[in-house]
Image (cartoon, rainbow, N blue to C red):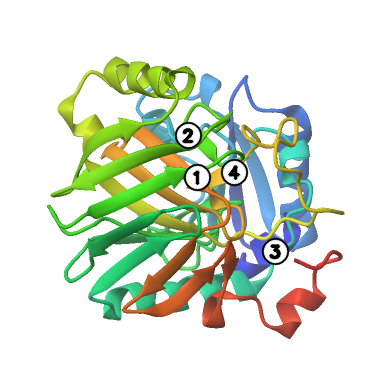
Amino acid sequence: MARQLELCRAAPGRPAIVLADEDTDPALLNSAVQALNKVGSLPRTVLVDDQPKGGMDADLTPPDIIVNLLNSYSDAGETFVPPNSRVLSVVAHNTGELRGVVPHVGLSRRVKRGMELLAAGQHLHVGDDKGTNLRIGLKGARRWKHDGIATTSGEDAQWPRGMIGTAPVLGTAKGTVVMSPGDIWLPMGWYARSSVVLTFEGGRMVSIEGPRSETDAIRAHLASVGTPSAYRLDAVEIGLLWLDRPRSPALFEPGFADSFGIADRYGHVVVATGDYPTVGIACCLRSATVAVDEVAAVRSGRPQGELAPDVYEQAAHRYPL
C-alpha cells in the first residue's frame, strides 16, 4: 500500500486522511495508516460514523490525499470527501484481497496506451476458437479506465484495479459470444459448465442457445433485472491487472470464479449487457482474442504489444505470466 501511495505521489510532511467506518477491516485500516506513515505523510483517521451528517469537521486541515476505505460503490463516501481532493479508494475489503498485488508504474502506462488504441480505432472485434465472433463500432464511443493512480486534484482512483473499457456505438454490436466451460458468468460468479451461444443484432441480445440447465439460470437472472436494457450490449472490457500466483488457475479452480477483482484479471475479456451501473449479464472470457482495426490487443487471453508488461514490470513480479 505504501508503494501505491508513492505512485500516487503522496507528499511527505503533508496531512492525509483515512476514511473508515465500523465495517472497515481493522487490519486494512492499520495498513493504510502505517503505509502513510512510511511515505512520510501525516495521517489522521476519520470514522464517518462519528462525523456530522453534512460531512467532516470543518477544522480538519485540507489533506494532500484521502485513502478511502469505505465501500467505493456507495454514495455515502462522497459526503465526506472535500471538493478537489485526491482520493485513493481501496476496493479490497480486507488485506487478504491485496495478496499478489504488485504496484508498478507499468500498469498505468499500459492502461494509457490501451486507451489511446481504443480512441484511435474504428471497430473492435472479439473472437476465439470456440465460435465467439462479435464486432462493435468505436468511432465516438465512450471509454473508461482504472489504473489505481490518483495524481491530480478531484481524481478518485480505485485500487487495486487495472482495466480499459469501451461502450459500443449505439446499435453497432453484431455477432456471437460463446461462453465455454471454464468461462465465468458475472456478476453471479458462476463457471460456465456447458457452451452457451449469445447472439447480438443491432446492439441487443436476440437469442440464448445452449443446454437448459445453463440457459434457464441465465434467462432467470436477466428477467430478475426487470428492465429491457438488460439485453443491450453495454461494454467490452479488457483486464490488465497482473496478480502474482505461483501457478495458473485450473479450469474450474475452486473459489476463483467469484474471487476479488476477477473481471480485471490480466487477459480476461468481459462482454457486458445492461445500463451501467445495472448489469444484465457479463461474460468473462478467459481465452478470447481482441483486435482494434485488426491490430491484436489480446490474443488467446494474453495482452499483446503495448498492453503487455515490459521487462521492467515483469522483473517486479515473482511469477511469470
Please report whichever mark, 3 or 1, sits nearer to the chain's N-terminal start: 3
Label 2, residues with CA under 10 Å away: few <14, some 14-19, many ≥20: many
Residues at circles 1 and 4 in contact by the CB criterion of under 8 Å: no
Q: What mark, if any, has residue 186 been given in the picture?
A: 2
Asked if residue 46 can be seen in this view, the reply is yes
Q: Secondary structure at mark 4?
A: loop
Residue depicted at x 76% and y 75%:
314
Q: Nearer the viewer, residue 208 or 90?
A: 208
Q: Quadrant of residue 307?
A: bottom right
| Direction from residue 59 to residue 115 in the image, left or right | left
- In the rendered image, residue 80, in percent from the top left (x then y), is placed at 43, 36
Q: Nearer the viewer, residue 39 or 15?
A: 39
Per the model, the C-alpha gap separating discs 2 and 3 is 26 Å
Per the model, the C-alpha gap separating discs 3 and 1 is 24 Å
The residue to which callout 3 is attached is 103
Q: Secondary structure at mark 2?
A: strand
The residue to which callout 4 is attached is 261
- Of marks 4 and 3, the one in the foreground: 4
Label 1, residues with CA under 10 Å away: few <14, some 14-19, many ≥20: many
The residue to which callout 1 is attached is 284
| Direction from residue 264 to residue 113 in the image, left or right | left
